[in-house]
Image (cartoon, rainbow, N blue to C red):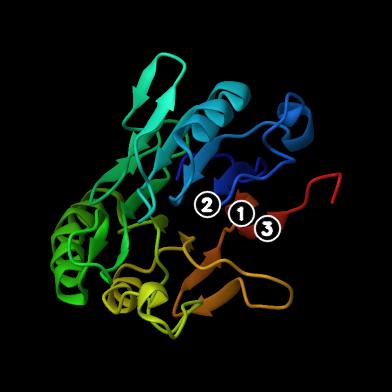
């Protein structure tokens, strides 16, 4: 990785609910510089457009959540969030830091024809195809992946018992094989003392609802706090 060890890479990850502290004119002063904006889905496209415009990060990516819909914007219908790249079933390498990213959209299917939902078997196939891309990373860069962003959590980690909030089973072997340092997800709203950070194999699994400020360093990962909190 080419990012200087002494300089943290600052990541803002968002999901599932607009945060009032972010959706305001002073957001840049509140958050500080952001090197990477990541969305794990279920957010209004206009909100993401605001964040990427106000914070002006060098890189910004998203995956769809199961509640994502087209939105009426100032200049017409928004079918995708402007200024962010769709990372679903894709990989990316950040130019200046060398950080390796990948993404998987949606949640476990609980409605027959709904968008951005997949059966466990469908997700297993998507993961298998993504793993082929990650194997190329391994050959070229010496590692598979640094950060995986998903909408739904892995099975048994931060998920729920109801059909709409089950986690994907295929994410577990993906973490064991590809060993990302971070898996960031949303989908499951958390309140009070509910777990948001779990270690699995070599991966920190983090529920970012409604946002997490993360500092990525060569020697570890820190979860920041805004000055107002």
Q: Which residue is mark 1?
A: 210
Residue 149 percent coordinates (x, y): 41, 55
Examine the rendered structure and indicate whether residue 126 appears above or below residue 136.
Answer: below
Q: Residue at x 33, y 51 (%)?
A: 102
Q: Tell me: 216 left or right of 192.
A: left
Q: Name the front one of labels 3 and 1.
A: 1
- Secondary structure at numbered mark 2: loop
Task: Tell me which numbered mark, 2 or 1, is placed earlier along the sequence.
Answer: 2
Q: Residues within 10 Å of mark 2 (few under 14, many from 20)?
A: many
Q: Residues within 10 Å of mark 1 (few under 14, many from 20)?
A: some
Q: Residue at x 77, y 26 (%)?
A: 26
Residue 126 percent coordinates (x, y): 17, 62
Q: CA distance from mark 3 to mark 1?
A: 17 Å
Whether pointer 2 and pointer 1 mark residues with C-beta atoms closer than 8 Å, the reply is: yes
Q: Which residue is mark 2?
A: 15
Q: Tell me: 121 left or right of 179.
A: left
Q: Residue at x 37, y 49 (%)?
A: 101
- Secondary structure at numbered mark 3: strand
User: Dividing the picture into quarters, in which one does residue 93 lie?
Assistant: top left
User: Dividing the picture into quarters, in which one does residue 114 lie?
Assistant: bottom left
Report the front residue among 202 and 54.
54
Whether pointer 3 and pointer 2 mark residues with C-beta atoms closer than 8 Å, the reply is: no
Report the front residue among 36 and 162.
162
Q: Which residue is mark 3?
A: 222
Task: Tell me which numbered mark, 3 or 2, is placed earlier along the sequence.
Answer: 2
């Amino acid at each position: 990785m080419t990012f200087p060890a002494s300089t943290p890479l600052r990541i803002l990850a968002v999901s599932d609910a607009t945060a009032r502290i972010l959706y305001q004119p002073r957001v840049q002063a509140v958050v500080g510089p952001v090197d990477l904006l990541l969305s794990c889905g279920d957010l209004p496209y206009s909100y993401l457009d605001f964040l990427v415009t106000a914070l002006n990060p060098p890189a910004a990516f998203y995956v769809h959540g199961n509640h994502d819909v087209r939105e009426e914007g100032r200049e017409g219908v928004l079918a995708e969030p402007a200024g962010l790249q769709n990372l679903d079933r894709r990989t990316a390498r950040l130019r200046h830091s060398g950080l390796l990213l990948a993404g998987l959209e949606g949640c476990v299917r609980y409605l027959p024809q709904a968008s951005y939902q997949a059966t466990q078997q469908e997700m297993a196939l998507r993961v298998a195809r993504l793993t082929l891309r990650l194997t190329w990373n391994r050959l070229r860069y010496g590692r598979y992946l640094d950060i995986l962003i998903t909408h739904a959590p892995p099975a048994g980690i931060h998920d729920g018992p109801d059909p709409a909030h089950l986690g994907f089973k295929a994410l577990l072997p993906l973490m064991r094989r590809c060993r990302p340092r971070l898996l960031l997800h949303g989908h499951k709203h958390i309140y009070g003392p509910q777990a948001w950070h779990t270690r699995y194999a070599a991966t920190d699994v983090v529920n970012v609802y409604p946002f997490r400020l993360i500092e990525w360093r060569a020697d570890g990962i820190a979860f920041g706090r805004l000055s107002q909190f």
